[in-house]
Amino acid sequence: MLPFGVFTAFSTIWLGLINPLGMGPGIHKAVREGDTNRVQIILAMHPELVNAAEPVGKGFYLSPVHLAAERNRIGVLKLLIARGGDVNNPGKAGSTPLQFATSNRNREAAELLLRHGATLDIFSAVALDRRAEVEHALRLADMFGAAKIIANFQSRGPYFRQNALLNWAVFGGHPRMIDLLVRYGADVNPVPSPSNWWEISPLHTAAETGAFEVVDTLLDHGAKLEAKDYDGFTPLHRAAARGDVRLAEVLIRHGAKLNNREDFHGSRISDLAVNPAQVSNNTILHTAADRNSPEMVAFLLANGAAPNALNAWGKTPLDLIEAEAKRLNRLDPDIHVRKEAANTALCLKLLYRYGGHRGSQEK
C-alpha cells in the first residue's frame, strides 16, 4: 500500500493540480476543457487556485474565470464564482472576464458575470448592444465636448490587440450600435500609425469575424472597401482567408476589387522596416488558394478573378495549390490530411477548368 504522501503526490499530478512539466496549475486546463467535475475536485483540495494566474504570453496572465468566460464554459464559470472567483479582476491580462466573454460573443457568460457583480464597462456595453447605457455615457461626455473622444476609445489590454470601440460593435454584430457611435464621431476609417500599426478598420473586423450583418451599415457610413490593414490585406482578402463566401459576396456586390493585391502601404515599409522582398503581392485568389478553400476559389473564379496572376515570386494560385498538394503527400494520411487533400484536388480541378497554369518561375 502506498504511503499517504506518495498517494497524494500521484493524485495531485493525476488531477492536474500540478503539471509535472512545471507549466503551471492544471485547473486552467480543466477549465479550458469545460471539465466541471475535475475543477470541483481541484478546488476542494486547493481552494486558493480559484484565482490562480496562468502565464499565456510575455508579461500577462489569465485566471480560471477569464478562461471560462472566454470559452463560454457556463457550468465551470458558475462553480468558480460560487467558490470566490473574481469577476472583476483584470489581472495581468489587462482585460476583465466580462470583456473576454463579450469579445467572443458569449452572451450567456457575460450575463452570468453581470448578475454576480461584474462591472459593465463601455466596451462590453457596446458588444452587448446596451444602447441605452452607451448613449447615456455619450450624452454626458457631449456636455463636456468629449463625446467624440469616448466614441473612439480603444481597448489596450495586452491580451487584446488595440481595438476601437466601433470594432466591439462590429464583432458583436450590432448595426444600430454602429449608427449610434458614428453619430457621436466614431471613425469608420482609422489610419494606422507606427504606434498602433496593428489596429484594423471596422470593415476588416467584420470580414475577419464573419459579421456580414454589419457590412452594409459600415459601407453606408463611408467605410472604404479597398483599405489595407497591417498585412496589406483588404477586407476581401480577410474574407477569402476565412473561406467566408457569404461575406465575400456582400463585399463584391458593393464593388470590392477581385484582383487587389496584398502589397503593404509604402508608409508601413518605412515605418516598420518591413523588407519589401518579403511582401507576397498575393491577389485575393492567391489567398484563397493558400488557405486551400475550394468554395472560395470557385466563387472568385466564377466572379472573374484572374486565374494566372503572378505574385511577387512569380507564382500563380495553381503553384500554391500544387505546393500544398506535395506537402500533404509527404504526411501520414489521417482524417485531417485526407480532407485537406480532397480540398486541394478540388482547387486544382477548378483552376485547370478556368485555364490556370504554373507561373514563369516554376522549374
Image: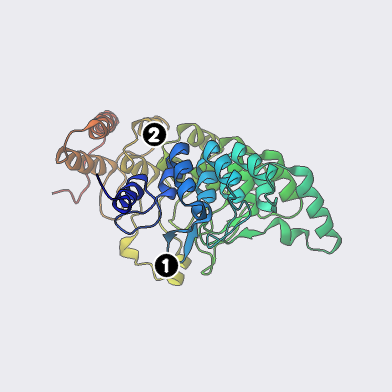
Is 133 on the left or on the right of 303, as rendered? Answer: right
- Residue 344 location (% of width, % of height): 25, 34
Rendered residue at 54%/65% (across/down): 196
- Residue 45 location (% of width, % of height): 45, 49
Is 203 on the left or on the right of 321, as rendered? Answer: right
Of 297 and 22, the residue lying toward us: 22
Of 343 and 347, the residue lying toward us: 343
Rendered residue at 67%/42% (across/down): 128
Of 17 and 322, the residue lying toward us: 17
- Residue 83 location (% of width, % of height): 57, 47
Rendered residue at 42%/65% (across/down): 58
Q: Which residue is mark 2?
A: 296
Q: Quadrant of residue 333?
A: top left
Q: Quadrant of residue 91?
A: bottom right
Q: Of the residues shown, which amino acid type is indicated by label 1?
A: Ile
Q: Which residue is mark 1?
A: 269
Rendered residue at 44%/49% (across/down): 28
Dot 2, crowdedness within 10 Å: few (<14), some or many (≥20)? many
Answer yes or no: is residue 116 visible. yes
Q: Of the residues shown, which amino acid type is indicated by label 2?
A: Met
Please determine whether, in this image, residue 235 is positioned above or below residue 146: above
Image quarter in which the N terminus is found: top left
Is 201 on the left or on the right of 33, as rendered? Answer: right
Q: CA distance from mark 1 to mark 2?
A: 30 Å
Q: Which mark is residue 163?
A: none
Dot 1, crowdedness within 10 Å: few (<14), some or many (≥20)? some
- Residue 210 location (% of width, % of height): 51, 38
Count of marks overlaid on the render: 2
Please determine whether, in this image, residue 32 is positioned above or below residue 191: above
Please determine whether, in this image, residue 324 is positioned above or below residue 19: above
The disc, 1 or 2, on the residue closer to the chain's N-terminal end is 1
In contact (CB < 8 Å): disc 1 and disc 2: no
